[in-house]
Image (spheres, grey):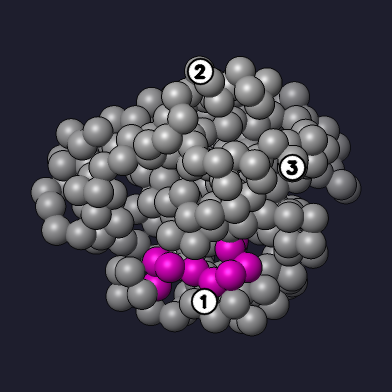
């Protein structure tokens, strides 16, 4: 997941996608935002394991299971690989992960697995761009406001060079969905509602476990997960990893979610 500008709530959306991915299996959210992660402080997690320890591990191991060794479990059971809050640390760690991005790809190519990567505010110089380019689907989030949409309009051609499959998602109030789609000339895959209470529960606030699914935001994110899953290709349709003879097993998913500060 990613954005070009603004604060569209990518981390909250990424959490929802991982939690509500259809078809069962296992899902993990990896904070690949070079500006620094939010989940460590938001959920009062440990600094390690996380993205920093993962960056060190992928230099030494090509095992698809290495990703799971650096995940922590949220109170509701969701697995996350937390990024450091420091932008300097996050950028350094992502540089290592970008150089060994096949580690994420191999993890996503395991059966019944989805890797959701929160890649932050994306541009041509972002160390998270390597993750975006290897994802099955890139989710571009934007608020339906003049400033956010101006950046989308000027940079959409870049996105087409980074990702062959993308979902454009509007967040919150603003211009009508149909008007945005017509003006930009691209379909809008989903629109996430302005739902502070639902966002608070999804982001670790107080509330019962079923409250996420009952909230307007939770329902919308669940529908978005269905849309993205429908666009994800089976791994057999991708070329194999360098040095391997065949593609990985079916039902693998890697989702890149790009967003700014939350």
Say which of 39 and 74 sits in front: 39
| Badge 2 or badge 1: first in the primary sequence | 1
**Residue shown at 25%/59% (left/top)?**
204
Q: In terms of secondary structure, where does tag 2 sit?
A: helix
**Residue shown at 34%/30% (left/top)?**
220
Disc 2/disc 3 C-alpha distance (Å):
20 Å
Q: Position of residue 99 (x, y in %)?
A: 79, 64
In front: mark 2 or mark 1? 2
Q: In terms of secondary structure, where does tag 3 sit?
A: helix
Q: Main secondary structure of the magenta part?
A: loop
In the rendered image, residue 39 lying in the magenta stretch gets the answer yes
**Residue shown at 74%/70% (left/top)?**
95
Q: In this view, which residue lies farthest toward the right?
A: 243
Find residue 46 and name its label: none
Residue of label 2: 178
Q: Which residues lie in the magenta part?
A: 32-40
Q: Which quarter of the rendering shows the C terminus?
A: bottom left
Residue of label 1: 84
Q: In this view, which residue lies farthest toward the front?
A: 146
Say which of 82 and 207 sits in front: 207
| Badge 3 or badge 1: first in the primary sequence | 1
Residue of label 3: 155
Say few, some or many: other residues with alpha carbon within 10 Å of mark 2 (under 14 / 14 to 19 / 20 or more): few
Disc 3/disc 1 C-alpha distance (Å):
28 Å
In the image, residue 139 above or below residue 94:
above
Q: Position of residue 259 (x, y in %)?
A: 54, 52
Say which of 125 and 78 sits in front: 125
Say few, some or many: other residues with alpha carbon within 10 Å of mark 1 (under 14 / 14 to 19 / 20 or more): many
**Residue shown at 61%/81% (left/top)?**
89
Left or right, 107 with respect to 238, comes to left
- Give the quadrant of residue 25: top left
């Amino acid at each position: 997941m990613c954005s070009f500008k603004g604060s569209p709530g990518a981390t909250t959306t990424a959490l929802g996608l991982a939690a509500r991915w259809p078809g069962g299996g296992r899902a993990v959210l990896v904070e690949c935002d070079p500006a620094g992660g939010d989940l460590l402080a938001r959920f009062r997690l440990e600094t390690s394991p996380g993205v920093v320890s993962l960056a060190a591990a992928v230099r030494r191991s090509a095992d698809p299971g290495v990703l799971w060794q650096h995940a922590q479990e949220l109170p509701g059971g969701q697995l996350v690989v937390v990024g450091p809050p420091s932008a300097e640390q996050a950028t350094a760690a992502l540089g290592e992960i970008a150089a060994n991005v096949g580690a994420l790809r191999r993890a996503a190519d395991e059966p019944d697995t989805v890797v959701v990567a929160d890649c932050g505010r994306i541009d041509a110089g972002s160390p998270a761009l390597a993750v975006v380019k290897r994802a099955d689907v890139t989710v571009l989030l934007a608020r339906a406001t003049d400033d956010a949409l101006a950046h989308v309009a000027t940079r959409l051609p870049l996105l087409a060079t980074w990702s062959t499959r993308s979902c454009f998602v509007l967040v919150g109030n603003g211009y009508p969905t149909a008007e945005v789609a017509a003006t930009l000339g691209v379909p809008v895959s989903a629109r996430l509602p302005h739902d502070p209470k639902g966002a608070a529960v999804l982001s670790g606030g107080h509330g019962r476990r079923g409250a996420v699914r009952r909230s307007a935001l939770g329902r919308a994110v669940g529908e978005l997960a269905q849309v993205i899953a429908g666009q994800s290709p089976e791994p057999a349709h991708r070329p194999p990893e360098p040095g391997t003879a065949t593609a990985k097993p079916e039902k693998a998913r890697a989702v890149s979610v790009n967003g700014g500060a939350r």
